[in-house]
Image (cartoon, helix red, strand yellow):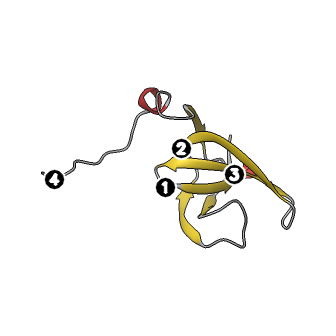
Amino acid sequence: MSEIKRELNPEEMSRVSGGSSKTIRTRQAAVYTGPGKEYGQAGSLPCGSVVNFTGNVSYNDKDGLSWYQINSPVPGWVTRNDLA
């Protein structure tokens, strides 16, 4: 059986674990595999992309940034500065 994939709308995202929809506010947000720039890049998201924030936050002493874990549309971590 094949799986059909589509983006979740904000209402559907609110019911996913974490349940907080946020919007990318920077021109292009890099998504990393872990909470820091020393991790590999998982992808990127353009300004205006709606993401689902899982509720996990991590502060990275190496880069001095707070990182928010997202699970949709690209699973990974983005900086707090990237989100509105």
Task: Tell me the mark number nearer the camera, choosing from 1 and 4.
Answer: 4
In contact (CB < 8 Å): disc 4 and disc 3: no
Query: What whole-number distance in Å separates the C-alpha atoms at marks 3 and 2?
Result: 11 Å
Instruction: Tell me the quarter of the image containing the C terminus.
Output: top right
Question: Closer to the camera, 2 or 51?
Answer: 2
Q: Residues within 10 Å of mark 3 (few under 14, many from 20)?
A: many
How far apart marks 1 and 4 lie (CA) works out to 20 Å
Residue at disc 3, secondary structure: helix
Which numbered disc, 3 or 2, marks the residue that appears first in the sequence?
A: 2
- At label 1, the amino acid type is Val
Instruction: Calculate the distance from the C-alpha at mark 4 to the C-alpha at mark 2.
Output: 25 Å
Q: Is residue 12 above or below residue 64?
A: above
Residue to which mark 4 is pinned: 2
Q: Position of residue 70 (x, y in %)?
A: 57, 48
Foreground mark, 4 or 2? 4
**At 51% from the left edge and 48% from the top edge, which residue is drawn?**
71
Q: Badge 1 is on which residue?
A: 74
Going from N to C along the chain, the mark reached first, 1 or 3, is: 1
Instruction: Residue 9 in the image: state x and y as whole percent.
Output: 41, 34
Marks 2 and 1 sit apart, C-alpha to C-alpha, by: 8 Å
Q: Secondary structure at mark 4?
A: loop
The answer to whether the residues at label 3 and label 2 have Cβ atoms under 8 Å apart is: no
